[in-house]
Amino acid sequence: SSPVWSPDGKRVAFLSNRDGTTQIHVMWVDTREIAQLTHLERAPSDLRWSPDGKYLAFTMLVPDTDPVLPIKLPERPAGAQWARPAIVVDRLTWARDGQGLLPRGYTHVFVIDATLGGTPRQVTSGKYNHADPEWSADGRTIYVSAIRKPDWEYLRGDTEIYAVDLQTLDIKPLTDRRGPDANPTVSPDGRWIAYTGYDEKGYTFHISSLYLMDKEGGNKRVLADNLPSSPMAVTWAPDGSGVYFLVGEKGTTGIYFASLDGKVRKVLEGTHVLSGFSLAKNGQVATVRSTFKEPGVLVTFNLRDPANLKKLVDVNEDVLAGVKLGDVEELWFTSSDGWRIQGWLIKPAEFDPTKKYPMVLWIHGGPWAMYNVAFNWAFQNFAANGYAVLYTNPRGSTGYGQEFVNGIQYAYPGKDYDDLMAGVDAALAKGWIDERNLFVCGGSGGGVLTAWIVGHTDRFAAAVSMRPVINWHSFVGTTDGPNWYYQFRKFPWEDPMEYALRSPLHYVANVKTPTMIMTGEADLRTPIGQSEEFYRALKMLRKETLLVRMPEEYHGWRRPSHQLAQQLYLLAWFEKYKRKDKDVPVENASQQAGRARQEP
């Protein structure tokens, strides 16, 4: 994994656990010979070649061996076996979803000879975590991002960029402001550093801007701000005239260019999503592109003619050959307070305009995320089973600027509910959706909104809430990080009602919709206790519900069989409660709007 080309293009460094532990390897491209460079006790990451190709920088955890509260157990009796030792926690963040309990220690930067290997040299120190290593053009300095302050755990990711002198190991801060600075990227001539960050303004979510400074940390200025979403994959132009970067906007991803004088233009845009890109010195770009009906395809183009894309590899072409997919229609509609909202409606694969079809409203997580125009196998699976699928970007989504993100500031869930209901109304206006058979589901943030929806309307025939937050009061102290405390004006012990009024649990007595809950048993982001609270409350109230527990799964399903099981459970639940002609029809949209429960 994590392949990185050497500057001369003759070698590729990568990580592999082929021998049981993750180590750094190098492959010579012409001979395909592979050499293992390291024999490390812990896994390395963030590989970076030095400009001359002689060295590799990487990051790795260095254990903190200082005992927190030392005790001495008596000598173990002969033949006896002690239980596993107790784990002592003294950090604000002690676990991470997908990893479990975090080992005590700090992430540091190391350098190793890219030909001989040997013992790596540690170039950062202290009880701080370091990330984003980037070499200076002369190879004498490595730039990193870190919070090198005593109270770093409480500074909410307020990183600065530092320069590490590889001869003396002196560390010099290049930035110093309230707000994070990260992702340093050095210009080809070594004079400039592009980086991302923002001025802290107290938002629950900030969109980053793109900045420039000289290699000493002076002459700071903005290259690109007021973007629809945070810049990604920042890459210098080969001639050093500016930087290219990706930006998500209105469901698509485009490549932008910012010149050194701060002029920004779009280089490549279209109805597609790009997943990273690689830029050669001759201006040739390679990227992975996806569209509504096209999973990731490796394509290339030249910056001189960006519209002329050439397909290189399409590993799914034979899989989709002869498969009929649902057509996708873009929707723009107006919410209750005049906000314009974007969404998409997938038609059933065998669509007949004279018929009416059931529809699933599928809600994204985050909530600071963006549904896009990329291929979505789960949506198309429902289209193949005769369902329409509606997916939208309610306020709070990225891709529409900071003001749109701020639409749920201290109010989540809130008006995003209105946005989703307006989307359903817009879909019904098409005339071919069966309003008796509306269904709703979502995961993570989408699970929150699904649980919120069934407590505020009865218009859906059935619902599935996956990996939800149900009770904000209990969630903020048990999730795998402290940042959710800052999504509220006060701490829960200061104003418990603020948390209650935004919790789906507060409205559980209103639920009439059959609601299934699905969560991984090892989920540390939205722990399964949240789902259990909702399930127990629904059962106590004798509501129609099920709890589906995915064994050994974190926040999202890693195993393909569980991904398949999700689809089958969703379909089975919706089919079970699909209303037939003989069933009593649900209230129409205007009746529902009249009896919608008011938001706090």
Image (tube, rainbow, N blue to C red):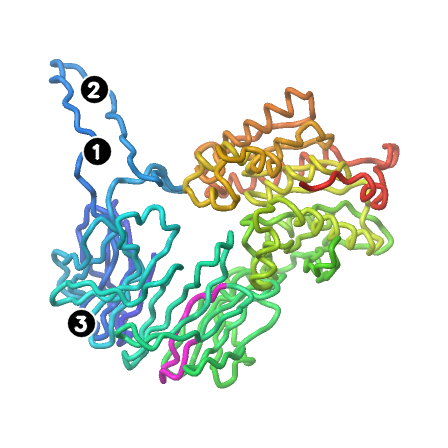
Give above or below for 325 relative to 78. below
The residue lying at 19 percent from left, 57 percent from top is: 124
Range of magenta residues? 230-243
Q: Three-letter amino acid code at disc 2?
A: Trp
In magenta segment, residue 235: yes
Pointer 3 local density, CA inside 10 Å: few below 14, some 14–19, many at least 20? some
Give the number of callouts. 3
Nearest the eye: 20 or 122: 122
Residue 404's quadrant in the figure? bottom right
Nearest the eye: 158 or 457: 158
* Residue topped by disc 2: 82
Q: Three-letter amino acid code at disc 1?
A: Val
Left or right of 37: which side holds 471?
A: right
* Residue topped by disc 3: 140
* Residue topped by disc 1: 68
- Residues marked 2 and 3 touching at CB (< 8 Å): no
Mark 2 or 3, which is nearer the eye?
Answer: 3
Among numbered discs 2 and 1, the one appearing first in the sequence: 1
> Is any atom of residue 99 visible in this view?
yes
Q: Quadrant of the N terminus?
A: bottom left
Among numbered discs 2 and 3, the one appearing first in the sequence: 2
Among numbered discs 1 and 3, the one appearing first in the sequence: 1
**How far apart are the two marked residues, 2 and 1, measured between alpha carbons?**
21 Å
Mark 2 or 1, which is nearer the eye?
Answer: 1
| Rendering coords of residue 144 (x, y %) | 28, 62
In magenta segment, residue 55: no
Q: Quadrant of the C terminus?
A: top right
| Rendering coords of residue 479 (x, y %) | 45, 38
